[in-house]
Structures are given as structure tokens and as C-alpha cells.
Image: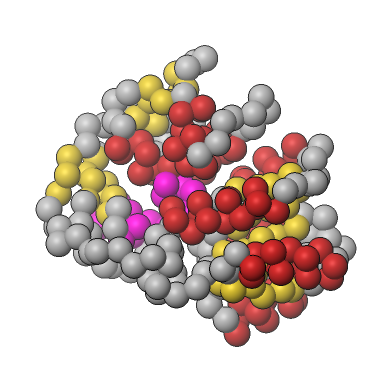
Amino acid sequence: MMQQGSTPQILIVDDDPEIRARLGKFLSDHGLDVSEAGNGQEMTAMLRRKQIDLVVLDVMMPGDDGLALCRRLRMDNTIPIILLTALSGDTDRIVGLELGADDYVTKPFNPRELLARIRALIRRSGMASTPRMPRTRPPVHQFSGWQLDINHRSLMSPDGHLVILTSSEFDLLAVFVEHPQRTMSREQLLECLHGRAIHQFDRSIDVHISRLRRKIEPNPANPTIIKTIRNEGYFFTPSVELAADPVNERSPA
């Protein structure tokens, strides 16, 4: 995570040098520090050299495509990922989200839309460049033995282990704990996460919830914490309490 007050470090991974150059200039002109990579090998090298805060990853690339690289990143990294996908690539979008991508932008796209998505992810993941006044008593939400620390963006399991969440998984859980025991529609959840209306075939919320269930549900096949309400949305069943003390740092599970 970048230090407060510093410029967000963005890595564009695309095999087309012209697209990288044009997109990189646009994002740089709007206050972001942009690096480029043309393939997976260059991406890995850049991640080793620099502290990257967000990756913009094209799906259609020769060799290891964006989905393979997304999978590789998610093996040991929670860095936010935005996929660039073909306009008709519904499968690419769903598979990409299942592999751990946080968001996607379909081609052709307006660079301002991508910029808005990047800024939203940066803001949500606590990387905003504007310094914020720290709270003296960070809010820790407790539910069913779990503890979610909003300021430190950490989740502790009932047995005392930190559970690693992607940026979107954390933000989705945060929405639920702030709206417990009420039905949230897909439209409401997507608006809270991305600030945009849902499209007819946008199943990103379902994919993120599926991934989140695998991490917090005793039996993901029969969820008891996040229940599906047919034709309405999702219902977060536990009661939620606020604790005064932040979650203690421990080794990840």
C-alpha cells in the first residue's frame, strides 16, 4: 500500500506499445505515476523493481494472456487489478473476476472511465493521495466471532488468524457489515462498490460474493452468513457490533 500523500503507482500491462503510450500519457497527465510492461516477464520485473499500487491488465495478449497473469498475481499478491476486456467478452470478465480481478473495463472505452475506476479502487483500498486525519479509535466491526478493521483493512477469523482479502472482497464485506440484517440488491452493492449502475449481464457482484463466501463461510455451498434472497439480492445475517480496539496484527492464515 502506498504512503499517504504520495502519487499512486500504476502499471499498464499490454502488448501494444501504442496503447500503452497513449494510455500512459493520459493517466500521467491526470496525476498518476505510470509504468509499462509488454508481457508477463516485464510485469514481474517491474513489480520487483517498484512498489506498484494498481495493475491495468489487458486480457488479449500473446503468450501468457491477462487471465493467466491475473491468476499468477493472485497467488501471492492482493494488489488491485483492473482488466481490459473485449466488448463481447462476458466470459473473460466472469473468469477474470473469479481469478481475483477487482474490476474491468470493456473495449472500446473512454480513458476517463478507466481513470474513474482507478481512482475509485485507490480510494477504496486506502491509497488516496490526500492525507487523512487518523482516528484515535479505529472502527472494528465484530460479527459471528470475526473482526473487520476498517482503517487497517484487515479481517481476523474467530480463531485469531488474519485472512487475506482482495480489495474488492474487503470492500464488499465492509458494505455488508455496515448494512447488517437487511437485503442488499445487486444494484445497491455495485453502486456502493463502484459508484455505477448495474448492467443487465453484469455478474461481478455474484463472483465477488462467491469468492468471499469461500473465505468466511463454514460451508460455502450452504452459506449462513451471506444468504441469497431469490430475485432480491443478498442478506447479511449476523448482528454487528463495534469494538473500540483495533485488530491485533498476526500472521496470515
The residue furthest left is: 244
Specify whether 55 is left or right of 163. Answer: right
Specify whether 52 is left or right of 244. Answer: right
Q: Is residue 166 magenta?
A: yes
* Residue 80 pos. (x, y %): 54, 59
* Residue 88 pos. (x, y %): 81, 37
Residue occupying image coordinates x 29% and y 31%: 180
Specify whether 49 is left or right of 185. Answer: right
Q: Nearer the viewer, residue 248 or 161?
A: 248
Q: Nearer the viewer, residue 34 or 28?
A: 28
Res 127 → quadrant:
bottom left
* Residue 159 pos. (x, y %): 26, 53
The residue furthest bottom is: 49
Question: Compared to 185, does 99 lie above or below?
Answer: below
Rendered-image quadrant of the N terminus: bottom left
Residue occupying image coordinates x 67% and y 81%: 45
Q: Is residue 137 magenta?
A: no
* Residue 162 pos. (x, y %): 33, 60
Question: Compared to 88, does 33 lie above or below?
Answer: below
Specify whether 156 is left or right of 102. Answer: left
Residue occupying image coordinates x 17% and y 44%: 242
Res 153 → quadrant:
bottom left
The answer to whether any part of residue 214 appears in the image is no
Residue numbers of the magenta segment: 152-171
The residue furthest front is: 29
